[in-house]
Image: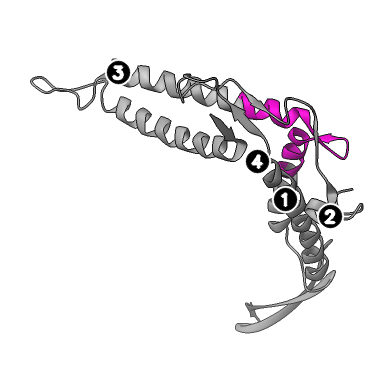
Amino acid sequence: MKHTISTGLRRIAELKGEINRLKEQIKRSVTWEDEEKPPFKYEALRNRLAAAKVELISLKGSIAAANARTMFEGRSLQQIVFELAEIKDNITFLTGLPAGAQHEVTKTRKEQEYIDNHYMTVETKSVHHFVYDEATKESDLDQMRAEATKLNMILERHKHRCRHHRPKGESSRKHSGFSIQNAQPSYVNRRELGLSRQSVA
């Protein structure tokens, strides 16, 4: 039976959910009052948790190996995975940086001050400087989002081309690894993705 990387990733998501549920059940099974029984059997839960983690590690390793030997423009898919993660981090970081309508913005502040035995409104002005004006910031973010989209296209394409092979009769919870076109290095065709030479430079 064969599984694509896409189905492998879905299984990983299921395993993470299962592991979280098992951990919560274990927490409820390590202590109880007299004449009460724990809601779950601790040893059975620990065994299930260990088995789920073994499968998770196996799947992650198989997917990472498939990504490492699949090439696109001189880069492995694993490298592209790392690049995509860094681009997403850059987007989050830049989004949080302040920007002004212009590089210099004058702000006026009015305060009440006690002068000559009565209160007076005092107006002060200050100039705030911004490395980013809002238009430039949004332009940079658009470029990052476009690059992230292109890298996602490459990865999505290969999720359905890289298949996991399991020997006949082997349990569905054991994974022998993913192979790509009989374990030979795989290369992405730019025309299949609709990308120009400059688009993934």
State how many labels appear: 4
Q: Amino acid at mark 1?
A: Met
Residue 91 placement (x, y as % from top left)? 72, 53
Q: Earlier in the sequence, mark 1 or mark 2?
A: 1
Binning the other alpha carbons within 10 Å of mark 4 as few (below 14), some (14 to 19) or many (20 upward) gives many
Estimate the spatial distance between the alpha carbons at disc 1 and disc 3, rounded to whole Å: 42 Å
What residue is shown with label 1?
Answer: 153
Estimate the spatial distance between the alpha carbons at disc 1 and disc 4, rounded to whole Å: 10 Å
Where residue 155 sits, quadrant-wise, is top right
Q: Amino acid at mark 4?
A: Lys
| Disc 1, SS | helix
Q: Earlier in the sequence, mark 1 or mark 3?
A: 3
Q: Amino acid at mark 3?
A: Ala
Q: Which mark is residue 195?
A: 2
The stretch of residues the image draws in magenta is 61-85
What residue is shown with label 3?
Answer: 44
Q: Nearer the viewer, mark 4 or mark 3?
A: 4
**Magenta stretch: residue 130 in it?**
no
What residue is shown with label 4?
Answer: 159
Residue 71 located left or right of residue 1: right
Q: Residue at x 34, y 31 (%)?
A: 24
Q: Mark 1 near mark 3, Cβ–Cβ under 8 Å?
A: no
